[in-house]
Image (cartoon, rainbow, N blue to C red):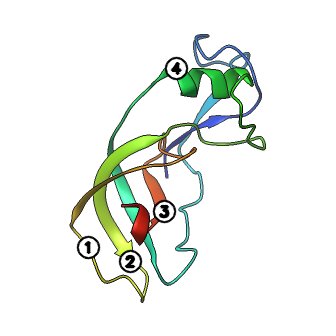
Amino acid sequence: MEALICRELGDPTLPISDSSPLRLSSDHPIPELSSPTSVRIRVRATSLNYANYLQILGKYQEKFPLPFIPGSDYSGVVESVGSGVRKFKVGDRVCSLALVGSFAALIVAEERDL
């Protein structure tokens, strides 16, 4: 799966290279459904905002363990659902907000958060 990974804290405005804190991965593991009410979404759109910038700089109020996938709000299409999911099915369009993780092809969220 493709994902933009923050490997180390630093200036996210640097071009992606060996000196950049960001790396584009084409073989990041596909996120597993973490509970019966989890939903895996194929991300179709996500935003880039000031909070993401601060996260990568390491100046955001919440600190995430490295490496992490930045990104917060997103929309996409349901790819798979846990056995307890009742409100959504594969192919449904959804949107949500996450602390991190939307700068990836796939993200997992709880049904109640969609």
Q: Disc 2, disc 4: CB below 8 Å? A: no
Return the mark for residue 102.
none
Query: What residue is at 58 percent from the left and 74 percent from the top?
Result: 34
Residue of label 2: 81
Whole-percent x, y for residue 33 in the image: 52, 74
Q: Amino acid at mark 4?
A: Tyr
Looking at the picture, tell me which residue is in the foreground, 32 or 48: 48
Q: Earlier in the sequence, mark 1 or mark 4?
A: 4
What is the distance, in whole Å, between disc 4 and disc 3 at their CAs?
Answer: 23 Å
Q: Is residue 51 left or right of residue 110?
A: right
Q: Quadrant of the C terminus?
A: bottom left
Query: What residue is at 78 percent from the left and 44 percent from the top?
Result: 65
List the single residue furthest toward the bottom. Answer: 83
Return the mark for residue 50.
4
What is the distance, in whole Å, between disc 1 and disc 4 at their CAs?
Answer: 32 Å
Say what secondary structure mark 2 lies in. strand
Q: Amino acid at mark 2?
A: Val
